Amino acid sequence: MKILDHVRSTITQDGAVLMDIRGGQMLTLNLTGSMIWQHLADGQSPEQIAETLSPRFGISREQALEDIHEFLGQLEAQRLIDPSETANPRSNVGPKPTGLSCNLFGEHSSPAAQNRSPK
């Protein structure tokens, strides 16, 4: 897993801001997305991140891993991480878990996120 060189990040008390200096765009992450981003920056694998976040959010490791892979897919789509180093062994773990990936990119990143009500 590799964060691309053209991405800068700023961590705040509310989450993080990612800046694609090559593409000229900014994305906001909520606290959960920020935690995942920081673990990625520290070189942790999705499995290691799931081990850390699972007990923190009171969800299974499998659910955490599924959400992390979904988040990584969003980062790949935005060209913020190197997809060649990302394995995405998505497994069917049932209904989408709540509490971890809900609105990882913050409220202003997508129409779907804007339609969600706060938990």
Image: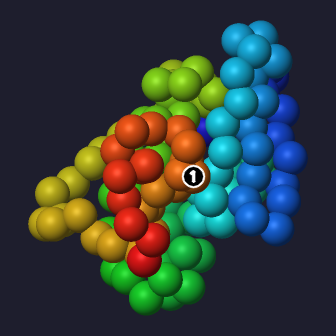
Q: Position of residue 116 (x, y in %)?
A: 36, 59
Say if residue 30 shows up in the picture: yes
Q: Secondary structure at mark 1?
A: loop
Indicate left or right for 66 with 16 as reference.
Answer: left
- Residue at horizontal 21 percent and vertical 54 percent from the top: 91
6, above or below 91, in the image? above
Name the side, left or right, on which 81 lies relative to 50. right
Dividing the picture into quadrants, the one containing residue 44 is: bottom right
Can the viewer see residue 64 in this picture?
A: no
Against 52, is 42 above or below? above
Q: Quadrant of the N terminus?
A: top right
* Residue 27 x/y as whole percent: 66, 36
Looking at the picture, tell me which residue is in the foreground, 111 or 96.
111
Residue type at mark 1: give it: Gly
Give the number of callouts. Answer: 1
Q: Quadrant of residue 33?
A: bottom right
Specify whether 81 is left or right of 99. right
Residue 17 at x, y percent in the picture: 76, 44
Q: Which residue is mark 1?
A: 106
Quadrant of the image for the C terminus?
bottom left
Q: Which one is in front, 102 or 75?
A: 102
* Coordinates of residue 14 in the picture (x, y in percent): 75, 65
Residue at image position (45%, 38%) is 110
Residue at 57 percent across and 52 percent down: it is 106
